[in-house]
Every structure is written in structure tokens, then in C-alpha cells.
Amino acid sequence: MKKEYAAEDMNRLLLSLCQVCFEEKERLTDIDSHLGDGDMGISMSRGAAAVESEIKKWDGRQRDMTKMLLNYASAFNRAAPSTLGTLLSFSMMAVAKEIDHREKVEENQLPFLAKTFADTICRKGKAKEGDKTILDALLPWTRCFECEMAAGKSLQESLGKASDEALAGMERTKGMEARTGRASWLDGRNKEYPDGGAVLCAAAGRKMAGQGRLLEE
């Protein structure tokens, strides 16, 4: 029997990712004060709080995962209308549309949905790996997750391996010169700091790796 995930599983995962935004708020603020305008931590935590609020309103009757995720994406975008916030919202919307109003998602569809999320950020943000953005952690995470799942590894194992790749990708942004966004205006100054989006992605990967066992139960 194929493993499937429903609305309550999605909500549990998203709540854990919201917690990442809260936990990383100060770190992101510090990094962004050197590479941007210093509001990343505040923006991400506000977006997460908006999503968390919407999830807590869920009474179990709404089972359409597309409608639910579109609602969360809109809430996030309203509360975090920054560049990264908008890109994350667009990506959530793209994933929601791929779910196509189903009430459950099969486990073997997860790598495709992860790739949809990453590809949307690439396209909408007009960035690529090596530009010192969230993609430097997200794309290695996505590739590894896809490969591990295709090789027949469990969800927990796949998320664990992918988490390691995201962390390694984030570490590689230290010393990189930013090629997009406000950080690119610095002409390499403060390049010793990692990219804030990549930091957030690596932390999210670590959290999801911890959630893998719960999802498999």
C-alpha cells in the first residue's frame, strides 16, 4: 500500500517550519544587517506567525490541500512582502496547484513537489546556484532528496541525507560574492557571511529531517 499524506500531515510539517523561522529570527536579522537591510528575521517570523495563525483555525473539515496551501501562501505573502517572502509564497502556490485539489498526496510525489518549489524560486527570482541565494542550499537539498527517494530510501533517510546537502550548500555561500539582490551592491564587502536564505533553508532541512520519522509513523 502506498504511503499517503493528508491535510493534518501538511499542517504538522508547516507548523514545524514556522518554528524554524521563529528560532532563526535573530540569526537572520544579524546576517541581513551585513548583507541586506536587516529585516529578514523579522519578515520571516511575521510570515510564519501568519501561517501559524491560519493553521490553528483549521477544524478538520477542509480537506482540499490545494485550497489550504493557497490560503497559507497568501497569508505568508501579506505578512512578509519582502523579496524572499514573495518568492516563498509563489513557490507554495506552485506546489498547491500541482496538488490539484487532492485530499492526499502519495509519498512518491514528494520529490516532484519539492522540485516544483525550487524551480519556481529559480524562475521567479531569476537566480541560479552560485549566486549566493537560498538556491545554494535548496537545490542541493532537492537533488539529494530526489535521488535518495528514487533509490528506494525511506522518507526519513532521504530527508536526513538531503539535510546534510543543504547544510553543505549553505556553508559554501561563505566567501561567495552575491550576484543578485541588495547584497550584490556591496561589491564583495562582508562576503564572509553566509546567505540568509541559505541559512534558513539549511535550518528547515534539519527540522524536516527530524520530522521524517513522525511522518512515517
Image: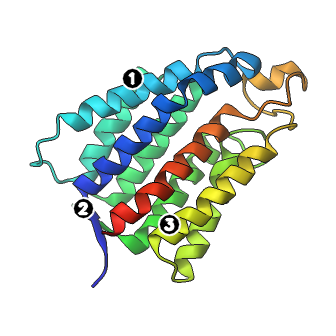
Kind of residue indicated by mark 3:
Pro
Residue at 42 percent of width and 74 percent of height: 108
Name the spot of residue 5 as percent of width and height, x first. Answer: 29, 64
Horizontal and vertical percent position of residue 64: 20, 53
Query: Quick one: label 2 or label 3, which is nearer the N terminus?
Result: 2
Residue closer to the observer: 83 or 177: 177
Q: What element carries label 1?
A: helix
Q: Tell which tag, 1 or 3, sits nearer the viewer.
A: 3
Q: Residue at x 40, y 65 (%)?
A: 213
Is residue 134 visible in the rendered image? The answer is yes
The residue at which mark 2 appears reads as 102
Residue 128, can we see it? no
Question: Residue at (44%, 49%) from the top-left corner?
Answer: 94
Which residue position holds label 3? Answer: 111
On the image, which quarter does residue 147 sit in?
bottom right
Pointers 1 and 2 in contact (C-beta within 8 Å) = no
The mark nearer the N terminus, 1 or 2, is 1
Q: What residue type is labelled 2?
A: Arg
Q: In which quarter of the image is the C terminus?
A: bottom left
Query: Dot 2: few (<14), some (14–19), or many (≥20) neighbours within 10 Å?
Result: some
Q: Which of marks 1 and 3 is nearer the N terminus?
A: 1
Q: Residues within 10 Å of mark 1 (few under 14, many from 20)?
A: some
Residue 77 in percent (x, y) is at 42, 28
Left or right: 139 in relation to 17: right
Residue 141 vs residue 108: left or right?
right
What's the mark number on residue 78? 1
Element on which disc 3 rests: helix
